[in-house]
Image: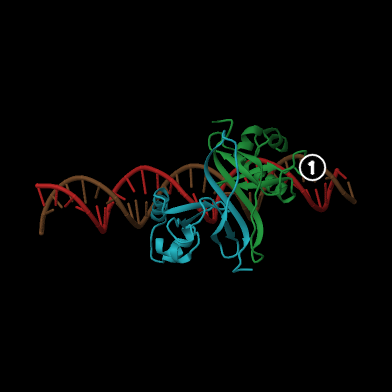
Chain colours: A cyan, B green, C brown, D red
DNA sequence: AATTATAACGCAACTAAGTTGCAATAATAC
DNA sequence: GTATTATTGCAACTTAGTTGCGTTATAATT
C-alpha cells in the first residue's frame, strides 16, 4: 500500500488504492491500515470537497520537504489529489485553537487540461 | 431556512438547519432547496474535514464583504463553521484550471475555548 | 515442536450523508 | 373550474467509512 502511494506520488482514496493494489484486500482492512499510518505520522489525510478522504505520504525527510500546511489540488478529471508546494498562511487570534488545516483547490490539473 | 442561516451568521449543516427550523421539513427537501440556492449564488457550500457539507449565506452586498475565497473555521466543539475574513492566496500555473477553493481550519473556536 | 498469546484480517452489518424516482399536494395559469 | 407546473414527502438507494466478531496468521514461551 505504501509503495502504491509512493509510486503514485499523489494522494489517493481508499477505492483508488484498492484498485491499484489489485489483489483482494478487504475495504475495512485498508481503512484500518490507513488510519493507523495516519496516527503514526506516515500518511496524512486530506478531505476533499467531494467529502472523501485521500491519503498521501508524509515526506518529512525528503529533499523537497512539503511545508507543514500546504495546498492540495484535486483534479475532477483524473480524480487524484496532488500536494502543492504552496504553504498555507493565515493568522488567527489566540482564542482559536487550531487542530487541523485542510485546503483543497479543485479543478483540472496540468496533466488533464 | 435563509433566516435561520442569517440569524446564525455561520455555516450550518443540513442537520443543524433542520433542527433549528423545528417544524417537520423533509431532509430531501432541505437538500434540494440548499442546492438550488447554491446554484443561484445565494448560498455557498463548504465541505469540512468531517466530510460534511455546510451552507452559508453569500454576502456580496453586505458591509463586510467577504473575499471571494476565504478561510473557514470549523469548531469541533460546537459543530459550526465560521467564515473568517481571511483571504486565501495562492498562485498556480496557467495549466491548472481552478474551479473551487475549499479551505477549512478546524479546532476550537473563540467562543468554546 | 507444541502450545499459548497477540496481532492482523475478512466478513457482514451498521451508520450517516446525500441523492433520486415517484406519487401526492400545492400553487399558478388559462 | 380545469389544466399545467412546481414543491414536497416518502421511501429506497448509493457511497464512504466504521465496528463487532470470529477466523487466520504471526510471534512468543516453555
Residue at figure coordinates x 68%, y 45% from the top left: B34
Q: Position of residue A42 (x, y in %)?
A: 41, 54
Q: Can I make out residue A76 in this image? A: yes
Note whether B49 is above or below A57 in the view shown: above
Answer above or below: position of B110 versus B52: above
Residue nearest the observer in this picture, A2 or A91: A91
Tell me residue B81's x, y (percent). 61, 39
- Identify residue for label 1: B61
Mark 1, chain letter?
B
Which residue is farthest front? A63
Asked if one can make out residue A1 in the rendered structure from this viewpoint, the answer is no
Q: As drawn, is A106 to the left or to the right of A34?
A: right
Say left or right for B16 vs C15.
right
Residue D19 lies, with reference to residue A76, above or below; the image says above
Provide residue B13's location: percent of width, then percent of height.
Answer: 61, 41
Mark 1 is surrounded, within 10 Å at the Cα level, by few (under 14), some (14 to 19) or many (20 or more) other residues, namely few
Q: Is residue D28 above or below residue A10?
A: above
Question: Where does the C terminus of chain B fall, quadrant-wise?
Answer: top right
Residue C17's image quarter?
top right
Quarter occupied by the N terminus of chain B: top right
Tell me the quarter of the picture where residue B7 sits. Answer: top right
Label 1 SS? loop
Front position in the image: C23 or B109: B109
Amino acid at each position: 500500500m505504501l509503495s502504491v502511494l509512493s509510486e503514485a506520488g499523489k494522494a489517493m482514496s481508499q477505492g483508488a488504492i484498492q484498485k491499484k493494489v489489485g489483489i483482494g484486500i478487504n475495504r475495512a482492512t485498508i481503512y484500518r491500515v490507513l488510519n493507523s499510518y495516519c496516527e503514526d505520522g506516515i500518511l496524512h489525510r486530506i478531505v476533499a470537497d467531494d467529502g472523501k478522504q485521500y491519503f498521501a505520504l508524509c515526506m518529512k525527510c525528503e529533499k523537497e520537504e512539503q511545508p507543514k500546511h500546504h495546498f492540495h489540488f484535486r483534479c475532477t478529471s483524473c480524480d487524484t489529489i496532488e500536494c502543492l508546494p504552496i504553504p498555507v498562511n493565515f493568522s488567527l487570534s489566540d482564542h482559536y485553537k487550531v487542530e487541523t488545516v485542510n485546503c483543497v483547490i479543485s479543478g483540472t490539473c496540468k496533466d488533464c487540461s
